[in-house]
């Protein structure tokens, strides 16, 4: 992460965000959410900025009733599969080898950013988009009805960045 005050050099920006000499400041448009995407760009736009951490995870999860996308506020993002009672299910015999229970799908050092940006899809149909403070725990439930026919495997795709 770059310093939050004082002089920043092009070499420090290059070291943080990548690139190779000869480097020009306009190579770093949109390097961070607060850095302009066009027009005038200044060295001060990079105060306290860091290269985003990118992630893209696909997870197949066995679910009986509903699933939760859960962020614990400590740098770990989970998918949880739940029974109708709300309990996390872990020992179902009808999951065909698919993961069940609470699975950590992504972990990061939360000192590396302030915001976790999440895009999530379930079977390419349900789509959710969230921006969360890295210090705040959060949960979103995805409801499924199985008609009493037992558990089913669903594909989750979660991608985003830490800035």
Image: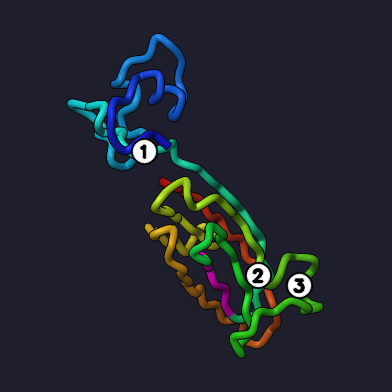
Q: Main secondary structure of the magenta part?
A: strand
Task: Label 3: state its secondary structure.
Answer: loop
Q: Residue at x 64, y 84 (%)?
A: 87
Which disc is residue 102 wearing?
A: 2
Q: Circle 1 sits on which residue?
A: 49
Q: CA distance from mark 2 to mark 1?
A: 33 Å
- Pinpoint residue 161: horizontal percent, then vertical percent: 46, 47
Q: Circle 3 sits on which residue?
A: 95
Q: Is residue 62 left or right of residue 16?
A: right
User: Magenta stretch: residue 69 in it?
Assistant: yes
| CB-based contact (under 8 Å), mark 2 and mark 1 | no
Extreme residue in the bottom direction: 85
Extreme residue in the front direction: 6
User: Magenta stretch: residue 112 in it?
Assistant: no
Bounds of the magenta segment? 66-71
- Pinpoint residue 41: horizontal percent, then vertical percent: 22, 27
Instruction: Identify the image quadrant of residue 7.
Output: top left
Q: Nearer the viewer, residue 22 or 47?
A: 47
Query: Is 21 drawn above or below residue 89 in the view shown?
Result: above
Task: Label 2: state its secondary structure.
Answer: strand
- Pinpoint residue 67: horizontal percent, then vertical percent: 57, 73
* Quarter the N terminus occupies: top left
């Amino acid at each position: 992460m770059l310093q939050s005050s004082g002089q920043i050099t092009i070499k420090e920006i290059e070291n943080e965000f990548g690139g190779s000499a000869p480097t020009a400041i306009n190579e770093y448009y949109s390097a961070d959410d607060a850095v302009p995407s066009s027009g005038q760009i200044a060295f001060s736009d990079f105060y306290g900025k860091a290269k985003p951490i990118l992630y893209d995870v696909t997870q197949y999860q066995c679910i009986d009733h509903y699933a939760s996308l859960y962020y614990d506020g400590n740098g770990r993002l989970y998918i949880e599969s739940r029974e109708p009672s709300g309990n996390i299910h872990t020992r179902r015999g009808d999951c065909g080898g698919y993961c069940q229970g609470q699975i950590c799908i992504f972990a990061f050092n939360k000192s590396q950013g302030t915001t976790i940006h999440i895009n999530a899809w379930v079977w390419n149909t349900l789509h959710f988009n969230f921006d969360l403070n890295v210090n705040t725990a959060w949960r979103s439930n995805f409801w499924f009805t199985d008609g009493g026919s037992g558990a089913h495997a669903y594909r989750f795709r979660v991608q985003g960045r830490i800035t």
